[in-house]
């Protein structure tokens, strides 16, 4: 808020942020090198603020639509399906390997395993081989998935029946095997707004 009690515009907030940044630099540089402080471009600061707001809005929309929750549920479902189709020792290797990746990668990882489109190679080491040109060695792995002769239990088409999907007609996510849209309460008036720097729905 300004001294007069009026709400500052985005540009005025960006200008204040620039002044605060310069004051911080001057304090760190000291009086001898104060003239070396770099003045940020106000437009760049304003653009950065708007990009952060856009990112916050996108995150909020995902939470409001329960996309994060659906992704977790679907990843758990696919993991259980893989556990039922893969030998226990191999599944343990794949499950441990998957944990080095971000959580939002889990659903795609197990989907690739179940359809045979995902290849996993673990604990590789060099083996000298003069027949390999020009390096003279090859890489052998202690664990490789899928093994020779393994037939994936699903195709992309059949696995799709077990996958949450976005419906073009209702705009909502359909559960596995759900063919009909569920009527939604009217929400034409709902919109995203910023109040005191926080995104909310009204």
Image (tube, rainbow, N blue to C red):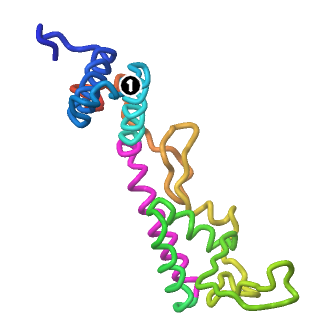
Residue at 48 percent across and 43 percent down: it is 172
How many numbered marks does the figure carry?
Answer: 1
Q: Nearer the viewer, residue 86 or 57?
A: 57
Q: Residue at (20%, 14%) from the top-left corner?
A: 7
Left-right relation of 63 to 102: left
Q: Is residue 9 above or below residue 56?
A: above
Looking at this rendering, what residue extends furthest in the top direction? 4
The quadrant of the picture occupied by the C terminus is top left
- Front residue of 79 and 60: 60
Which quarter of the figure is the N terminus placed in? top left
Which of the two residues, 183 or 125, is positioned nearer the viewer here? 125
Disc 1: CA contacts within 10 A as few (<14), some (14-19) or many (>=20): some
**For residue 87, which quarter of the picture?**
bottom right
Instruction: Tell whether position 12 is magenta.
Output: no
Q: Is residue 4 above or below residue 98?
A: above
Where is residue 27 drawn, in percent x and y? 20, 33
Residue 126, horizontal then vertical, whole percent: 69, 87
Q: Which residues are magenta?
A: 62-86
Work out which residue is located at the far front of the displayed protein and give it: 32
What is the secondary structure assignment of the residue under circle 1? loop
Q: Is the magenta region chiefly helix, strand or loop? A: helix
Estimate the x, y position of residue 161 in percent, counting from the top left: 60, 61
Q: Quadrant of residue 76?
A: bottom left
Say which residue label 1 marks: 40
Q: Give the residue at x 63% y 65%.
A: 159
Q: Is residue 32 left or right of residue 59?
A: left
x, y (%) of residue 29?
Answer: 26, 35
Describe residue 198's horizontal placement relative to residue 122 as left or right.
Answer: left
């Amino acid at each position: 808020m300004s001294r007069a009690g009026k709400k500052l515009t985005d540009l005025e907030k960006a200008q204040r942020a620039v002044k605060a940044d310069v004051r911080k630099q001057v304090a760190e540089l000291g009086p001898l090198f104060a003239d070396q402080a770099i003045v940020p471009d106000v437009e760049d600061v304003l653009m950065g603020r708007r990009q952060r707001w856009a990112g916050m809005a996108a995150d909020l929309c995902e939470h409001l639509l329960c996309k994060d929750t659906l992704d977790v549920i679907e990843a758990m479902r696919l993991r259980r399906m893989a556990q039922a189709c893969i030998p226990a020792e191999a599944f343990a290797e794949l499950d441990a390997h998957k944990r080095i990746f971000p959580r939002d990668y889990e659903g795609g990882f197990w989907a690739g395993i179940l359809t045979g489109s995902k290849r996993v190679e673990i604990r590789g080491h060099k083996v000298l081989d003069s027949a390999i040109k020009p390096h003279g060695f090859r890489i052998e792995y202690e664990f490789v998935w899928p093994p020779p002769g393994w037939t994936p239990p699903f195709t992309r088409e059949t696995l799709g029946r077990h996958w949450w999907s976005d419906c073009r007609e209702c705009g909502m996510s359909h559960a596995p095997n759900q063919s009909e849209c569920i009527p939604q309460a009217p929400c034409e008036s709902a919109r995203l707004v910023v109040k005191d720097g926080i995104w909310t729905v009204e």
